[in-house]
Image (cartoon, rainbow, N blue to C red):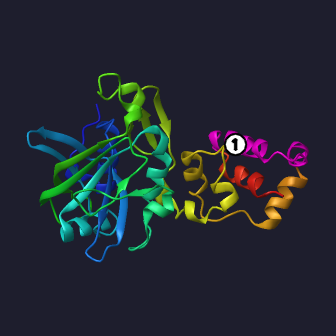
Amino acid sequence: MLTIDPKEISTAKLHSYLLNAIAPRPIAFASTIDKKGKVNLSPFSFFNVYSSNPPIMIFSVNRRVRDNTTKHTLENILQTNQVVINIVDHTIVHQASLSSTEYPKGVNEFIKSGLTMRKSEVVKPYRVAESPVQFECKVNEVIALGDQGGAGNLIIAEVLKIHIRPEILDENNAIDPLKIDLVARMGGDWYTRAREGMFEVPKPLRSKGIGVDQIPEFIRNSNTLTGNDLGRLANVERLPLKQEVEDYISENMKVRELLSGDDRSQVHQRAKELIEQNKVVEAWKLLLAK
């Protein structure tokens, strides 16, 4: 039995033990806005529902371990006392992950992740239109649990309005657990899908992804590639160089044969297969090939 005194290991190591042991964790995909109208969107997995009457949800925004700074979500909430908690299903999990990239303050993560801003009815932060359930909330209290790196800030949010996409409802207007297809966080890069089990989503924090907005329009408007596919394509630091694409074509007979046809949908289908095999850079080279 490995026995650990939390005071005798680094915060980063303790954080890893906690997140790998306390799982799966639901995801609060939090949309906020600052007093100047700048929006922010970020996922948090220290989250759950704690009361039905009144309807209360709590999620925690931790101070960064590496430098003890606070996140834009917390800063915005302290200014406005409002948040929209969007639920993450499998169809948007890669885009949600991409939004956790630490873009500079003022960068709109809706745009970077390729998700749609939908106006809320009673609060100022926008909803994620693609989310299966969206909760408009007022923040009743923020409780700081410490002032050092890794310390949480509990956001106690009261639900004022709920929006549910009709396609996840059954014949009785109840949420169907199979249709909603929820995902949850495990430790490291691992997630779990409620109806199928575990899968990996590489963390975008290791690099700053280019964002969906930087994907060329002919790829972004593909009828084959999904939002998740675009999210994975957007999680690269740079596009392949022209010479890299040309080398890829010259070295692959099957690629040249695929490109010789006029049907770009076949190219996009093959790129989709490469993305599913975690060969994202190769998918980019194929998509950029002429």
The answer to whether residue 265 is above or below residue 35 is above
The image quadrant of residue 288 is bottom right
Residue 273: image location, x then y, percent: 69, 39
Question: What is the three-letter code of the residue carrying label 1?
Answer: Leu
224 up-or-down from 76: above or below: above
Is 269 magenta? The answer is: yes
Image quadrant for the C terminus? bottom right
Residue for point 43% across, 47% down: 130
Give the prevailing secondary structure in the magenta stretch: helix
Horizontal side of residue 263 vs 50, given as left or right: right
Membership of 250 in magenta stretch: no
Q: Which residues are magenta?
A: 252-278
**Residue 93 pos. (x, y %):** 46, 45
Nearest the eye: 208 or 181: 181
Mark 1 residue crowding within 10 angstroms, few (<14) / some (14–19) / many (20+): some
Q: Which residue, given by chain and number where applicable, does mark 1 sit on?
A: 274
Quadrant in which residue 236 is drawn: bottom right
The answer, for residue 135, to whether it is visible in the render is yes
Q: Residue at x 28, y 68 (%)?
A: 70
Q: Can residue 210 be seen at all in this image of the molecule?
A: no
Q: Which residue occupies 43% across, 71% down?
A: 107
Residue 267: x and y, percent?
A: 77, 45
Please identify the residue farthest to the top as the structure is shown.
171
Is 289 in front, or is 19? 289
Q: Residue at x 14, y 45 (%)?
A: 56
**Position in image of residue 158 (x %, y %):** 15, 50
SS at badge 1: helix
